Image: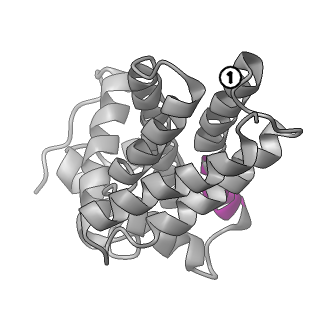
Amino acid sequence: MTNYVKRHYDSEQTRQIIAEKATQLFAQNGFSGTAISDISKESGFSKGHVYYHFENKEKLFVFLAQDSMRLWGEKWEAVSTAYPSATAKLYGMATFVLNHYKTPLLKVGQELAANPSTSPETVKSLYDLAVVPMQAYAGIFQLGVDTGEFDTLDVQETAFLFGTWMGALCQHVFTMEYEVLHRMFQQSVTIFLGGIQKK
């Protein structure tokens, strides 16, 4: 029988442990293949503790996905300062997107979003994850406009188009060799810049 942690515990630490174990289980078994009882057993906390912190399995996964995307944003912020211009940042971003697309939860999120029984609220939350990279793209384009590197009328629209291009290329990370795909990511930036660089 599992020995559950007693009631006097650190709430935030409990939440973190549950999240870490759930991430591992989702990555190994998928969403449908992971039960709250599995997460309870692996984390050492009762199912009641899991439900107390996350309400249900979908909300738990959304929390993990949002946290993963928050870390994505923080990692980009940390490396973006190394690029001296908006143009350099755009090339850097293309490589960053390629290198950070494969995550343990990626396929699980796709499984959950594609499942007809998934709640509309959860599906919306998963699609809303795109806000983080879109804001990062928009930041680069706004910088380019401010410094006179780029000429674009609508920064948000430009960011959306760039993000769509990046997303389309990301679909090939499991089927193409890294070097070939990396070259394509860089070439896509070159082509994209042809339409927005100040003449």
Residue at x 21%, y 35% (from the top left corner): 5
Residue at x 44%, y 52% (from the top left corner): 186
Q: Is 32 placed left or right of 124 in the picture? A: left
Residue 176 magenta: no
**Rendered location of residue 59, percent (x, y):** 55, 52
Q: Identify whether 134 is placed above or below 70.
A: below
Tell which of 184 and 9 is nearer to you: 184
**Rendered location of residue 43, percent (x, y):** 22, 45
Image: magenta residue range: 121-129
Residue 127 magenta: yes
Tell which of 97 and 123 is nearer to you: 97
Q: Is 135 placed left or right of 78 in the picture? A: right
Q: Is residue 64 visible?
A: yes
Residue at x 64%, y 46% (from the top left corner): 193
Would you call the spot at circle 1 few (<14 residues within 10 Å), some (14-19), or many (20 or more)?
some
Tell which of 39 and 68 is nearer to you: 68
Quarter-of-image position of residue 101 = bottom left
Q: What is the quadrant of the C terminus in the image?
A: top right
Residue at x 38%, y 42% (from the top left corner): 49
Tell which of 84 and 10 is nearer to you: 84
Q: Which element carries disc 1, helix, strand or loop? A: helix
Q: Is 154 placed left or right of 18 in the picture? A: right
**Rendered location of residue 25, percent (x, y):** 26, 60
Q: Residue furthest front?
A: 199
Q: Is residue 128 visible?
A: no
Q: Residue furthest right?
A: 153
**Rendered location of residue 73, percent (x, y):** 49, 32
Q: Identify whether 49 is placed above or below 105.
A: above
Quarter-of-image position of residue 104 = bottom left
> Label 1, on which residue?
143
Kind of residue at disc 1:
Leu
Q: What is the quadrant of the N terminus in the image?
A: bottom left
